[in-house]
Image (cartoon, rainbow, N blue to C red):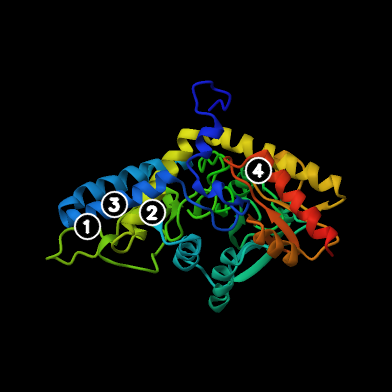
């Protein structure tokens, strides 16, 4: 989408969808994001229907769930049958970690300094005799040559984060995907720090599995996420959780016929979080309307401003400055206590976070330049008060 299209609403118009901007400067979308008025209205609509009509609206609810599934598929460049709704990113990761047919002596690759949700489910496979190999982090980056150097004939899977939660490094998924395909290994992507701000195409990037919760860049509440499984692989994953919805004839309650669905819907074992799916759907509709290319361009612009202001103050920018190597996270280090700075900023109504000893700043498309300048003015005051 051309983000200069004059038919689109201005970003200032979209900013009005976020009442939080009236009281706070919110720069922690890599943590837990606020939601828009559209998401609020979607949840209120569901609650109103549940209150006033109950099960009389059940078919409409299920129809909306399938509409949201299709929107998620569009967002990822996949088919709707490849999408399952999950509780969170860890849920999606664990389904693959526990569901693959591992053989003792197999190995898999994880990345150093990745978020724990993309580490612990894999470490748990040590009990099965699976070797866990760690791709080193080089100045916050994961290098393709380091990945390739750890792959051998027993390597079954590589898992990466599309954007590192701390350094903000954005890995080149297309290059990594081609490597995995060439080497004949499975490719898992934890996309929680990019989905909603960076375009994603699971087929173009040769991604086999992907998981992402909605509560960060997707601007949806916690508790509902997206899991993608390549169609050809779904039947090869033995779901660690089984329920009535995992089965082909899910509505035939009177006859037991244990045949699992052959697509990603086998991973939805029971009743869904319908209210959460309504919220996620409204959030994704909103992001599609704004335009993911437009969102990415805006977030990169704000990142450029953060980098310039940090460098004016001789702060170290630990996030790559190259636009191709970063998403929405900018992490800075200075001669200051980052926890103290974060706490002082919060007292002034400015929300950032601290990861890896750095102040992590993560704006979204609706943030304004003056908010970034206000942030650095506040940091200046904290530094002077030391």
Q: In the rendered image, which residue does mark 2 sit on?
A: 84
Q: Earlier in the sequence, mark 2 or mark 4?
A: 2
Q: How far across and how far down the image is residue 11, in percent?
A: 55, 33
> Which is more toward the observer, 245 or 181?
245
Would you call the spot at circle 1 few (<14 residues within 10 Å), some (14-19), or many (20 or more)?
few
| Residue at the (67%, 48%) spot, across then down | 171
Would you call the spot at circle 3 few (<14 residues within 10 Å), some (14-19), or many (20 or more)?
some
> Which is more toward the observer, 137 or 184?
137
Task: Determine whether 88 is above or below 182 in the image.
Answer: below
Q: Are marks 3 and 2 in contact (CB under 8 Å)?
A: no
Q: Earlier in the sequence, mark 3 or mark 1?
A: 3
| Residue at the (85%, 45%) spot, across then down | 312
Q: Earlier in the sequence, mark 3 or mark 2?
A: 3
- Cα–Cα span, label 4 and label 1: 50 Å
Q: Is residue 253 visible?
A: yes
Q: SS for tag 3?
A: helix
Tell me the tag on residue 51: 1
User: Is 52 displayed left or right of 130 in the figure?
Assistant: left
Tell me the tag on residue 175: 4
Q: Earlier in the sequence, mark 3 or mark 4?
A: 3
* Number of numbered callouts drawn: 4
Q: How far across and how far down the image is residue 12, in percent?
A: 55, 34
Q: How far across and how far down the image is residue 336, in percent?
A: 82, 63
- Cα–Cα span, label 3 and label 1: 8 Å
Q: Are marks 1 and 2 in contact (CB under 8 Å)?
A: no
Choose mark 3 or mark 2, whichever is in front: 3
User: Is 299 displayed left or right of 209 in the figure?
Assistant: right
Would you call the spot at circle 2 few (<14 residues within 10 Å), some (14-19), or many (20 or more)?
many
> Which is more toward the observer, 87 or 235?
87
Q: In the rendered image, which residue does mark 3 sit on?
A: 46
Choose mark 1 or mark 2, whichever is in front: 1
């Amino acid at each position: 989408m051309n983000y200069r299209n004059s038919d689109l609403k201005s970003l200032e118009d979209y900013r009005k969808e976020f009442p939080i901007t009236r009281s706070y400067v919110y720069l922690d979308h890599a943590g837990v994001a606020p939601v828009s008025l559209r998401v609020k209205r979607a949840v209120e609509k569901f609650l109103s229907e549940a209150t006033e009509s109950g099960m009389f609206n059940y078919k409409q609810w299920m129809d909306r769930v399938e509409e949201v599934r299709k929107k998620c598929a569009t967002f990822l460049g996949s088919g709707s049958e490849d999408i399952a709704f999950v509780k969170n990113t860890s849920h999606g990761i664990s389904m693959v970690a526990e569901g693959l047919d591992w053989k003792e002596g197999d190995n898999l690759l994880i990345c150093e300094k990745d978020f724990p949700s993309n580490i612990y489910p894999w470490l748990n496979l040590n009990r099965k005799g699976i070797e866990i190999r760690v791709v080193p982090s080089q100045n916050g980056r994961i290098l393709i040559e380091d990945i390739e150097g750890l792959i051998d004939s027993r390597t079954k899977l590589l898992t990466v984060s599309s954007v590192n939660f701390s350094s903000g490094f954005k890995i080149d998924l297309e290059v990594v995907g081609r490597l995995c395909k060439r080497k004949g290994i499975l490719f898992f992507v934890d996309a929680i720090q990019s989905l909603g701000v960076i375009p994603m195409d699971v087929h173009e990037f040769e991604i086999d599995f992907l998981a992402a919760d909605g509560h960060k860049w997707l601007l949806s509440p916690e508790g509902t996420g997206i899991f993608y499984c390549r169609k050809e692989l779904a039947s090869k994953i033995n779901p660690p959780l089984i329920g009535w919805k995992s089965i082909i004839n899910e509505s035939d309650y009177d006859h037991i016929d244990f045949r699992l669905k052959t697509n990603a819907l086998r991973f939805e074992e029971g009743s869904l979080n319908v209210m959460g799916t309504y919220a996620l759907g409204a959030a994704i509709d909103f992001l599609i309307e704004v335009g993911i290319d437009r969102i990415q361009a805006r977030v990169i612009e704000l990142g450029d401003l953060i980098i310039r202001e940090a460098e004016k103050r001789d702060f170290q920018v630990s996030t790559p400055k190259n636009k191709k190597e970063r998403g929405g996270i900018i992490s800075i280090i200075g001669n200051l206590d980052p926890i103290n700075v974060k706490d002082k900023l919060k007292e002034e109504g400015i929300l950032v976070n601290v990861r890896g000893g750095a102040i992590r700043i993560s704006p979204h498309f609706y943030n304004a330049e003056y908010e970034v300048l206000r942030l650095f003015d506040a940091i200046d005051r904290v530094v002077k008060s030391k």
